[in-house]
Image (cartoon, helix red, strand yellow):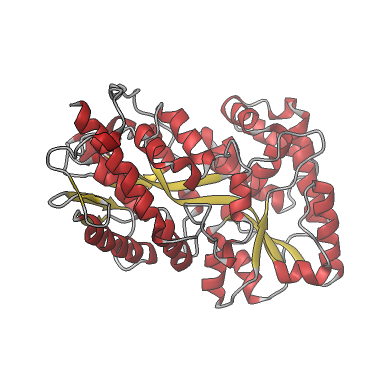
Amino acid sequence: MKKKIVSLLLASVMAVSLLAGCGNSGNSAPAENAAPAEEAAPEKEEPAPAEDTTPAEEEAPAEGETAAADGATDYSGVELTFWSMWSAGEPQALVIEEAAKAFQEKTGATINIEWKGRDINTIIQTALESGEKIDIFEDDYSRIAKIYKDFCYDLTDMAAAAGYDAQSFKCFNDVATGWAGFLPCVTEQPQVGGIFYNKDIFDDCGITPPATWEEFLTACQTMVDKGYQPLALDSAYADFTFGYHLDRYLGEAAISELAMNGGWSENESVAKAAQDIIDFVKAGYLADGAPEEFPSSQNKIGLTGKVAMIVCANYVCAEVNNNSGTEINWSMFNYPSIEGGADASNSYAGANSLAVTSYSENPQAAFDFLMFLTSGEFDQKMADSASQIPADPRNTAPAIMNGTVETLQATSNPLSWNMGLNDNADLKASFKELIIQLYEGKFATGEDFAAAMDALY
């Protein structure tokens, strides 16, 4: 038994080491679906740890496993079923298909892919509960770590043996492990939120990315003086935009507490944050017509060449380019800090991720394929063809994602979508309505806005 375990571990290390050498180095998501799932399943019973043993190089291959000619693990005869959240023909799907073929050629394992589309979260739990033949599945990492964790294989030891920390973003691993109690998934498609801007406009105005709210206002005025309109805003993202601003005053935990229990008028920072927005709108820093219906305002970044920025997640770059038929010189910076406010180093971050089922008969082969797909050559292809952030930060982000990797690496405690405002499911739509009115200039003072929020309870 000891020999078999050791051989498996050695095979994993050898396979990952070899496979990582394969390379060196427009997504679109609706705003309302970007928040992570809120309900968690009961805690998972931890699997027993592997036995300690002697050095692997002294052991013969385990029964049924051999080393392939190129040194990779031979998984001949192994068939893995992969439920994907993409649809056939999408850029991500094409890369996955190519990776699966290459993995089969290298190891002998067959990857049977079933394209389930974005609504995989509506069917995956029932399938997992019934023990349907699934070895790998994709979904948002928060749903995997909270809702599906009882059906996820504990990847902690495999990840350590593969050196996964060095080829991934720490914030996702830490948060997913904190939610599940173990590492339940591997990041496939990172997302980050902040202020995305047309670098050509910034260069024309001589502006460098501002770090504080005061610097941000100065930059906006400079843009106005040069004939530009600083900030696009569609109503779909109004609560995300204000949530970011409020977070810089209070932090997400405090926002969540207010969302659940009220007391907005009793916290003076709420009125200050709202007053900032009232003054911002009066100064003429919103694009003409904003807030508009999605995606009218953000499209003006490409269609007019005069609108400079938007607060959103990174998929907005591909959306604007595709909708406007232009190639904006995109870059991003994190939302600016407020003097005396909360920690401003964190950003909104989310990830579509990959999990191995707890009942998979070939978990090591499944994990090895995940490493093959999310690092090296195929991760780079995924980032380039889908205009997304690479899952492996050692790879190169496409130009459209300039600034995103650095922002993610600086994030230790990712913010959730709308920064706690969504925690009150019953009132989140009402919060959004009032926030849209805030950007429409319908509140005379920040205190008026805070009072209106309290009136919802």
Using the image, determine if residue 31 lies above or below residue 248: below
Task: Decide which of 390, 364 is in the foreground and name it.
Answer: 364
Identity of the residue drawn at 30% across and 39% down:
10
Residue 129 at x, y percent in the picture: 21, 34
Horizontal relation, residue 175 to residue 50: left or right: right
Q: Residue 303: which quarter of the image?
A: bottom right
- Residue 80 vs 227, above or below: the answer is above
**Quadrant in which the C terminus appears:** top right
Residue drawn at point x = 21 percent, y = 53 percent: 68
Question: What percent of the width, then of the height, locates residue 407?
Answer: 63, 49
Please, is residue 435 above or below residue 110 in the view?
above
Residue 137 point in image, percent of width and height: 29, 46
Identify the image quadrant of the N terminus: top left
Q: Is residue 289 visible?
A: no
Residue at the far bottom in the pictured view = 325
Q: Between residues 105 and 384, which one lies in front from this camera angle?
A: 105
Report the residue at 41% width, 26% height from top: 181
Relative to 357, 25 lies left or right: right
